[in-house]
Amino acid sequence: MTTDTDLELVSLTKSYGATVAVDAISHQFKSGGYACLLGPSGCGKSSTLRMIAGHEDVSDGAILLAGRDVSYLPPAKRGTAMMFQNYALFPHLTVRDNVAFSLRMAGVDKPERNRRAGEMLELVEMTTFADRKPDQLSGGQQQRVALARALITRPQVLLLDEPLSALDPFLRIRMRAELKRLQRELGISFIHVTHGQDEALALADEIIVMNNAKIEQAGPARDVFNAPRTAFVARFMGGHNVLNLPQGHIALRSDEMVVTAPEAGCIDGRVIGVEYQGTHVALTAEVAGGQEVTALMPDADFIKAPKDLGEVIGLHWEDRVAHPLTA
Amino acid sequence: MTKQFTAWIQAAPMALVLLAFLVAPIVMIAIVSFWGATEYSIYPAFQFDNYEFLFRSPVTYTVFFNTFKYAAITWAFTLVIGFTVAYFLAFEVRSLKWQIALFLLCTIPFWTSNIIRMISWIPFLGRNGLANSTLISWGVIDEPVEWLLFSDFSVILAFVHLYTLFMVVPIFNSMMRIDRSLIEAARDGGASAWQTLRHVIIPLCKPGIMIGTIFVTTLVMGDFITVRFMSGSQRANVGRLISNDISLLQYPSASATAVVLLVAVLIVIALLLRLVDIRKEL
């Protein structure tokens, strides 16, 4: 075992004829971390993951894992394992045989592979379902089985392709806590593809935001959310206002905006929307140049000084919360 | 009108058709199989003479053995060829347009009649046919090969030619239902192409294989015309036995043979259904 288990992408490219799905991206994933590839559909995040997994040919560039070039190795020889979006469990095999599949392919004898499959099922708390077929399981249970099947090969990197998208919202939140727990317990790298920024923020140590086949911004979750570098990132992460002011584009977190009396703030605006959100009230105001700005007020503050539609208000922010954007 | 009564009414037309054209004839055959016959007459009776004669005659066993032999060999060839063709269509041909085009190509032979397709083998396989003259001109053989036509070889060749499509269609159908991510998942788990075939594709194609098997075995076991044409009347199967009896107006004897054949085919199908549950497919 090498201590250097980092996964590195070196100017990785995927093109289908003239269309470029992934355009020369380079990134070094921290080993043992939870990374999320985040972006809208068609941004190249899934292609990137599938190239790392070995299910898509690399058009150009390289994938390095633990210092060796794995770009052209078959999936099972890379030290990665993939969990598929629809779980891709074998419908004709029991849960136990599904989990033990890769061991069976490797020629491990039956008592040994059943023992190890049993351990994995214990890890995901599915021991009691070992003899069932996948179609007798709920979505969440199928996902646990898929997870156990991917983990049994003891991969250095687990690749998850939109693992939570098939679950209902309640289960999604439970399963993401579970994923995070497993990742911490196992100490291996997880790379998780998602288009939900809340999912990425909740899970990731590191977020890689992709758009148009390129990486827009990568970094710790808090940095990406707090200091978006581009207007795209600010808008995609949500909770931000992107303002075009004479000094350039800036991003402002809506919860950092302070509502003041007219002409007492940095900018004036006319209220065009009031939305009650429970703990907060979202005030949308139209400012100079027809731009919309949203300010999140704690509900108690709003009740003390309610605003009506059409009312003119001032909006104030401190300079340190205004992040200049490059584009 | 109660719901149940409506349901009966809705099911009635189909039930009547089946009753009149399937159940009634079979019952009739079963009844006639107990009748008696002389050289010039048939008389109603309830006797086991026909069955006794059938089971006493060594010809019966040879002919039944032949029938099973044709069925088994044809099954083996149609399965291998049919599976390969279906695999190619389902997994190697990527675009739907080509899949449809190639699939239609497979059905082209069916645009002509069975008999014409059989007869067209004769000038090809005959003593001075295309196959023999080509082989001689290539120097592979010096004398025309005799067993190409009017032999078990030509009978089975014709069967395989006629019935492979009945294997291709259900297997292709099964294969198209296999989620492609399962193949990737197998690869991710370290399965070689062969292991994927053995552990994922074949098990998931079992219902299709079984339906194709039922088609082919029942068609081959019930056939008489192919055996007659392609063997030049030198080989016999049960179908020919029955057809001979009928041409001699020996209906009771023909019926008895038909009943035994029907039972034999039903036993084969029952055994096959034990192996695989095809209801999932339907």
Image (cartoon, rainbow, N blue to C red):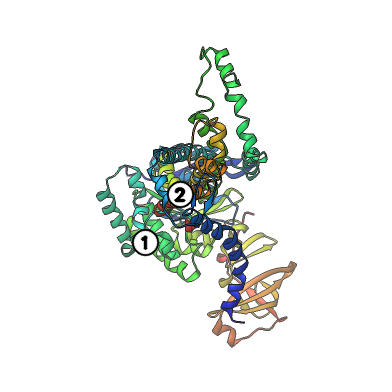
Residue B40 in view, yes or no: yes
Farthest residue in the right direction? A289
Q: Position of residue B66 (x, y in %)?
A: 44, 37
For the point 33% across and 47% down, the residue is A103
Q: Position of residue B193 (x, y in %)?
A: 44, 39
Q: Which amino acid type is shown beneath numbered disc 2?
A: Val
In this view, the mark in front (1 or 2) = 2
Which one is in front, A224 or B227? B227
Mark 1 nearby-residue class (10 Å; few <14, some 14–19, many ≥20):
some
- Give the vertical position of A228 relative to B110 (above or below): below
For the point 60% across and 69% down, the residue is B12
Which secondary structure lies at badge 1?
loop
- Give the vertical position of A272 relative to A251 (above or below): below
Q: Check the picture and name the quadrant holding the C terminus of chain A.
A: bottom right
Which secondary structure lies at badge 2?
helix
Q: Position of residue B169 (x, y in %)?
A: 56, 46
The residue tagged 2 is B265
Q: Which amino acid type is shown beneath numbered disc 1?
A: Arg
Which one is in front, A289 or B77? B77
Q: Which mark is residue A132?
A: 1
